[in-house]
Amino acid sequence: MNLYEFEGKSLFEKYDIAVPNGVLVRRGDDYAAAYSGLKIADVVVKPQILGGGRGKQGGIRFCTSHEEVARACEELFDADFEGKYVAAVRIEEKVDIAVEHYVSITYDTKFAQPVLVYSARGGVDIETVADEEIQRFLLDVRVGDINVQLAHAKDLKGVRQVCAHVWKCFLNEDVRVIEINPLAELAPRTKFEGARWVALDAKVVLDDDAFYRHKEWGEFEPRTMMGRPPTERETAVAKIDEGEGYYRGTAGKYVELDGDIAVLFSGGGASIASMDALKTHGLSPANYTEYSGNPPREKVRELAKMVLSKPGLRGLWIAGGVANFTDVAETFAGICDALDEVKPSYPIVVRRAGPNEEEGMRLMRECGERHGLRMKLFGKEVGIGETAKVLAEMVKE
Amino acid sequence: MLINKDTKVLVQGMTGKEGQKATKAMLDYHTEVVCGVTPKKGGQEMEGKPVFDTVGEALEQFPDVNTTAIYVPPFAAKDAIMEAIDSGIATISVITERIPIQDTAYVLAAARERGVWIIGPSSLGYIVPGVGRVGVVGGPLVDEIFMPGPVGVISRSGGMTNEVSWQLRKAGIGQRAAVHVGGDLLMGTTYVDLLTMFQEDEETKAVVVFGEHGGRYEFEIVKMVADGVFTKPLAVYVGGRFASTLPQGVPIGHAGAIVARGESAEDKEAALRDAGVMVAERYEDLVGLVRPHVS
C-alpha cells in the first residue's frame, strides 16, 4: 500500500525523523483557518497524491498569507496531476535549507536484500543524478543495527543517524519502499526543534502481506492508484480476502476500468496474458479481476457478484489456464451462484481446464441452459487468446 | 536435473488441506515423499507417511531427506523455512503465498550463506516429466500435460507453467523440466539459475519463458544471452502490454509485477529482441518459435 506524504511523515515522527510542522486540510475545509492555526507565516502548500511528479507539475506552492493559502488549496484540489487523485492538501512550515540530500531504502531484486541509496544531490529525480554522486549500501534484514552494516561507509557524515532511524522504520513497519527526497540539511544556526536534518517529503510503500502483524493499518483511508477514490465495488471486493482465512485463496482483486467487457480471470499470469489478448481483439475491459490459489466457492461468489453488478456490460469473459490445484468445479459453482442471480443477457465465453473440469463445465452448462444464457464453453483444446476472439465476434453480432 | 532417483521429500504443513493434496499429488507421480511435519500433529499419518512435530525429529528417522515442500500459512513460513535451513536440507520449495517480503529476504539471506537452494516463494513447485514432481504442478491432469522431452519451461505464473507446457504437449513436444519460480518481487531461484542449469543439461534443446512486466529479472536474461552464457534457442513471452494503458503503480498480476520506469512489457521485449531472443507476441506463439529447434 502506497502512503500519502502526510501518512509517511507521521510514521517518520514515530522514528525520530524530523519533519516540518504542518496541518492537513480536506476538500471543503476552512483552509485559511487551518493556516492561521499553524501560527507560521512562511508555508509550503502541497497536494497529497499517490505517486511522484507533483513538483514538476507545479504542485508545490509557497505562501505567506491566508489569502494565498486559501487560493493555493482551491487550485490544488482542482488541479490535474497526470490524473492522480488529490486526497488532501498539507500546509507545512517552510524550512531554511542549506543542502538537499536523498535517502531511500528499497529491495534489490538481484541480492534479495534492502539497499540504502544516499546522495548529497537530492531535491531532483534521483535517476537524473550522476552515478558517481550516488552511494549504495547493501543491507541485511537480519541485522537491526545499521551502524554495523555501514561501518566502512565514508562520506555519510551527519546523515548516518537519519539512516539509522530510516532503517528502524523500514524493518519495524514492514516497509517495501521508503524514500526521503529531499532530506534537508538546514542552514547553519537554523536548527528546527533541535534537528539539523528534516524530511521534507515522504514516499512510503507498506508491504500488504504483513498486514496481519499491523492491526493499525486498518485505520488508513481506502485508496487506489487509479487517480480517483476507490469505487464502491473496489471497496467491497477488497473485503473478500479479509479475516482469518485471508491466505486461503485470493479473490479480493478488482480494479474498475472504463470498458464494457466484464472479466473473471484465474491466476496472475493468465490474467495479464488475457488482458493483453482482450486488447488485441479490440475489446475494452470493464474491470481487472483475478482469483487464484483455490479460493472457496463463497469468496468467488462474492467476487463474481461484484463483477457482474457493473452497469452497461456487453460481455463476460471467464478465462484461465490449465489449473494445477484450483478446483474448477468449486470456483465455477461460485460464479454460477452469481449468474443465477444476475442472468445476464450479454454473451459469455468461458475457457478453463484443470482439477474437476468436467464437473465445473457441467455446472456452467446447466446454469446457461437454466436461464437461456448466450454462453460458449471451451476447455484446454482452444488457447485463451482464441476465445477472446470468439467473444469479440459474439459481442459484435 | 532438479529431481532424480535420490530425491526424498519432506512436506512441512503435511496435515493442512493443501499439504495433504500435495502429498497425494507427489506420490501419485512416483515422487518419494517420505514423511511430513506439522507442529503438535506428531504421531499421525498422512497417505501412509509418518508426521512429526519438528523437522529435527523427522530427520532423525529419515536422515536422507534432501528436499522439503513448504505448505504452512504465511505467518508461519519464516520459522518453518529457517527450521529446514538449520536442519541442513539442501532444497526448499516454498509454495506458501503472501509471505511478508522481509521474511522472504531473511530466509533467502540465510539460505545463501548455507548453500541451500530455495525455489519460490509463491511457487507451485517444479516437475521433471517422467521422473517426479515437487508440489502440485500439473495437478490431476499431469499425464495429459507433461511428457519427457527437450524443452525447459520457466514461468512467473503457476497456471501458465501448466498452460505453456500444455501448448507444447499439444504440438507433440515434451518438457525436460517445468519450474514455477513464483510471482513475488524476490525469488530464491531466478531465470538465471535455471537457464544456467538448462544450458549445462545436454538433453535440453530449447527453453521457453513466461515472463511479466515489472521487476528487473528479464533483463538478466538479456545479459546472459548477450554475454554468450546462455546459447540455446530461447523464446520469451512478457505479459502485461495492456498495463501501459493504466496509471503507473496499479497492481496488476503478481506481487512482483509492480512496474517501475523502464520495466514495462515493451521495454523488456525490446531488450530481449536486441539480444537475439525470440519474443512471442502471445503466449500461444511460444511453441511455434521453439518448434523448428527441437524437431
Image (cartoon, coloured by chain):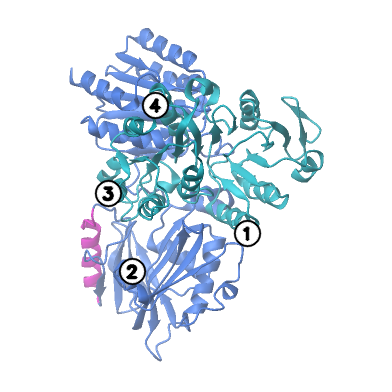
Q: Secondary structure at mark 1?
A: helix
Mark positioned earlier in the residue sequence (4 or 3): 4
Q: Report helix, strand or loop for mark 2.
A: helix
Q: Please name the residue that numbered disc 1 is placed on.
A: B113
Circle 3 Cα neighbour tier, 10 Å, few/some/many (<14 / 14–19 / ≥20): few
- The one nearer the camera, B103 or B291, is B291
Quarter of the figure with the N terminus of chain B: top right
> Which disc number belongs to residue B167?
4
Q: Position of residue B26 (x, y in %)?
A: 62, 28
Q: CA distance from mark 4 to mark 2?
A: 44 Å
Name above or below for residue A131 compared with residue B86: below
Secondary structure state at the residue bearing disc 3: helix
In the image, farthest residue toward the left: A397
Picture mark count: 4
Upstream in sequence: badge 3 or badge 1: 1
* Host chain of mark 1: B
Mark 4 vs mark 1, CA separation in Å: 39 Å
Report in which chain the residue with disc 2 lies: A
Give the residue displayed 29% in from the left and 65% down from the top.
A31
Residue topped by disc 3:
B270
Residue closer to the observer: A334 or A265: A265
Which chain does blue denote in the image? A
Q: CA distance from mark 1 to mark 2?
A: 32 Å
Return the residue at label 2.
A126
Chain for disc number 4: B
Q: Which residues are magenta?
A: A65-82
Q: Is residue A67 magenta?
A: yes
x then y, percent, for residue B31: 64, 29
